[in-house]
Structure formats: C-alpha cells, structure tokens
Amino acid sequence: MEANVRYTHQVLVEQSKEGNRNAQYQLYGLYVDAMFNVAMRLLTVREDAEDILQESFVEAFKKLDTFRFESTFGAWLKRIVINRSINHLKAKRLLLSSLENEAEPVEDDNAEIIPEMEIEKVKIGMGQLPEGYKQIITLYLIEGYDHVEIGEILDISTSTSKSQYHRAKKKLIQIVNEL
C-alpha cells in the first residue's frame, strides 16, 4: 500500500512539474493540513501560518523542477515550510539576539523532556517559552531534526543548538513544575 501511495505522489509531482494544475491542486490537498500544522507549531499565529503556508506552496510549485525525489515530496515541502517560518520569525526579530555568544557545549541526551507530565501543562509551558527556545524544542522534539540540521536551519552552530536545547528543556521543566 505504501509503495502505491508513493507511486501516486510521484505521478502527481511529475504531472505538476509539467504544469498540470489539477495535479498541483491534488498535491496541495494531500499536504496542506500537515504543512499548516508545521507552520503553526513554529509561528503560533494562525494568520502568519496561513501566509507562510501559501507562500511555501507557491515556492514549491515554482521550484518543482529542482525536486529530484532524493526524499519524499512531503519532506521536501516541510523543509520549505520550516525555512520560510524561520525566516518570517527572523524578520520579526523574534529569535534570540545573541545565540552564538551564549554557546556552550552540552551533552546531547535523548531523554524524555518531561516524563509523565500532563500534555496540557507542557503546551502551556511551550507557550511561555521565549521564541528561540520554542523553536529549538519544536525542531528537535516535535519535528525530529538533529542538532546539525537545526544549526543549518537557524544558521547557528551545532553546539549552539545543543546548548539552547538544553537551556530550553531546563526552562520548560521549570515552567511546567511551577504550573
């Protein structure tokens, strides 16, 4: 079944590359909800997420000729959405101002951030984190990027990503424990 879905998506991508608007519309329908969720997790403002979502699809369809099936279309599109979301936040100057200056190497542990805590408390805690911390947590824990990839996305060093993740995790635990 999965191979069938992948084949269908590949056919839709190929047809979209040829300018088939119906295929583009079908691809949009297949990915719009998931990509909106990605944008919302990073931006948290519905209108911003909707704008970034539309811009991302426009960019994806314009650059579809560069898509070489080295990953899934969804992974490729997700990268566009994340990059556009990050650029949007940078433009609004919501990133931490001096990430590089605060870098300190830390151990990269994959332990659970908050074992056995209620999800609602974590959501509230995430909402209270500074934007930079929220981005690192979201990219690492929710989106599944490693610190090298996060460094590339945010244009910071790997060690900065690790240290910011460590600080963000510590801050989130503190906030959740105070709730």
Image (cartoon, rainbow, N blue to C red):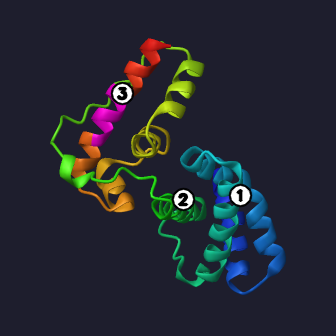
The three-letter code of the residue at mark 3 reads Lys
Q: Residue 145 appears at what percent x and percent y?
A: 40, 48
- Give the distance between the C-alpha atoms of the residues marked 2 and 1, in whole angstroms: 11 Å
| Alpha-carbon span between mark 3 and mark 1 | 29 Å
Q: Quadrant of residue 23?
A: bottom right
Instruction: Reply yes or no: does residue 157 show up in magenta.
Output: no
Magenta stretch, residue numbers = 164-170
- Residue 1 visible to an observer of this rendering: no
Q: Residue at x 70, y 49 (%)?
A: 46
Q: Which residue is mark 3?
A: 171
70 over 46 or under it: above or below = below
User: Which residue corresponds to the image point at 74% horizontal and 58% vertical from the top-left?
Assistant: 30
Of 20 and 162, the residue lying toward us: 162
Q: Is residue 94 visible?
A: yes
Residue position for label 1: 50
Q: Position of residue 129 (x, y in %)?
A: 45, 34
Q: Which residue is mark 2?
A: 85
Which of labels 3 and 1 is toward the front?
3
Residue drawn at (61%, 45%) of the image: 44
Instruction: Indicate the secondary structure of the residue bearing disc 3.
Output: helix
The residue type indicated by label 1 comes to Glu
Magenta span contains residue 167: yes
Picture quadrant of residue 137: top left
Tell which circle, 3 or 1, labels the residue nearer the N-terminal end: 1
- Secondary structure of the residue carrying numbered label 1: helix
**Considering depth in this image, is 65 or 54 the residue closer to the camera?**
54
